Image: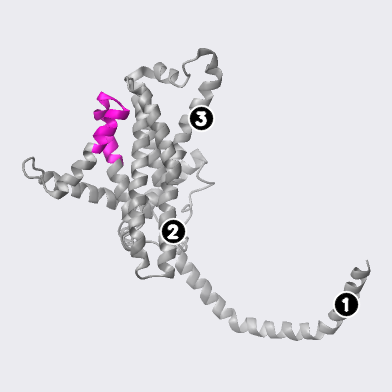
């Protein structure tokens, strides 16, 4: 109480002495505020202009050009399609961000009719098609080139994993699994190029890839075992544990979507952020030294996604190598822990 009384008396005295100074400071601040009002308005204009280029996020030149050419037409289609979808599903938000806006207003709010990740993934698809078309035209069994031999190493590796994890009939899944491998690996590498962003650094892309893998192996399970046989797969081998095991297995199966998508997104996004931060601090030499680490991350995350997809296929396929698939899955989980 003694200390509080001293502080209170000192505060009243200080307030009385500082009142003229406060008044003078207020007058000076008002005058200074009038002088700087124009500067504040100008800064706000610059902020609005920056928002029009991605809301403070870097938008690659290619994405800007694609939206400049096709954005208005796509925006007009979205004005018809998107509002009913938002109102029906009610999981993306209360309303579509472009509702009631013109194209210029939509761009100024930081949105793009054709998102950056769509443009980047389209680039990956185009590059993959061109590269595979060129390689296919130069295949030779008598005198294979170094590029062909390198590509064959990857092909044989995928075929070997399919035979081990899925069984003798696993080769029929090769087109889907190899497509995953090529698209994810090229997507991961794209961010290493100047003014490019990895599509897999966006959660929407990795979520779409995970849902595709999830839907494919469950469809294979239903096609090979029948709907009832696939459902029994989640019940476990002991009948009296079915009430406990069935919900656990269903939740575990659904969680694979988040597991596949978040792992891929988190690692690629984190690698790009770290590389960008280092490049901003030390723009010379050091970023080049980090490129091998980026290459390793791109390869490792592709390998984990594809391998887990094959393990999931092996679980729902009826063959004699079931137990081997579960053992490999345990090894993959251990490997992931060390990788993280």
| Upstream in sequence: badge 1 or badge 3 | 1
- Height in image: 194 above or below 334? below
Q: Position of residue 272 (x, y in %)?
A: 40, 57
Give whichever of discs 3 and 2 has the lower sequence position.
3
User: What residue is disc 3 on?
Assistant: 251
Residue 162 located within the stretch drawn in magenta: yes
Give the spatial CA distance, label 2 vs label 1: 51 Å
* 62 vs 186, nearest the viewer: 186
Other-residue count near label 3 (Cα within 10 Å), few / some / many at <14 / 14–19 / ≥20: few
N-term mark: 2 or 1? 1
Residue range of the region highlighted in magenta in the rendering: 157-180
In 3D space, how far apart are the residues under numbered discs 3 and 2 (Cα atoms)? 32 Å
Q: Which residue is mark 2?
A: 273
Seen in the picture, residue 132 relative to 113 is either above or below; the reply is above
Helix, strand or loop at disc 3?
Answer: helix
Q: Write down the residue under mark 1.
A: 10
Can you tell which mark lies on residue 317?
none
Q: Quadrant of the N terminus?
A: bottom right
């Amino acid at each position: 109480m003694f200390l509080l009384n001293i502080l209170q008396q000192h505060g009243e005295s200080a307030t009385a002495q500082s009142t003229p100074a406060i008044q003078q400071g207020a007058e000076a601040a008002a005058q200074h505020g009038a002088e700087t009002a124009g500067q504040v308005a100008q800064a706000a204009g610059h902020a609005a202009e920056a928002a029009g280029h991605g809301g403070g996020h870097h938008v690659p030149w290619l994405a800007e050009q694609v939206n400049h050419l096709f954005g208005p037409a796509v925006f007009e289609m979205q004005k018809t399609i998107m509002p009913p979808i938002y109102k029906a599903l009610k999981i993306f938000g209360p309303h579509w961000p472009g509702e009631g806006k013109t194209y210029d207003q939509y761009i100024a709010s930081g949105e793009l009719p054709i998102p950056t990740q769509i443009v980047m993934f389209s680039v990956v698809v185009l590059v993959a098609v061109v590269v595979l078309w060129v390689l296919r035209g130069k295949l030779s069994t008598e005198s294979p080139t170094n590029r062909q031999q390198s590509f064959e190493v990857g092909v044989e590796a995928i075929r070997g994993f399919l035979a081990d994890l899925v069984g003798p009939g696993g080769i029929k899944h090769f087109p889907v699994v190899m497509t995953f491998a090529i698209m994810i690996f090229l997507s991961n590498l794209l961010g290493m190029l100047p003014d490019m962003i990895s599509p897999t650094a966006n959660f929407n892309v990795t979520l779409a890839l995970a849902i595709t893998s999830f839907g494919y192996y469950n469809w294979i399970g239903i096609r090979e075992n029948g709907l009832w046989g696939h459902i029994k797969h989640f019940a476990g081998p002991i009948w009296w544990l079915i009430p406990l095991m069935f919900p656990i297995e269903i939740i575990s199966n659904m969680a694979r979507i988040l597991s596949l998508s978040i792992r891929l997104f988190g690692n690629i996004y984190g690698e790009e952020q770290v590389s960008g931060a280092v490049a901003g601090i030390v723009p010379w030499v050091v970023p080049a030294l980090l490129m091998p680490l980026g290459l390793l991350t791109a390869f490792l995350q592709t390998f984990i996604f594809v391998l887990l997809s094959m393990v999931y296929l092996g679980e729902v396929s009826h063959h004699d190598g079931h137990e081997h698939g579960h053992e490999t899955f345990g090894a993959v989980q251990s490997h992931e822990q060390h990788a993280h």
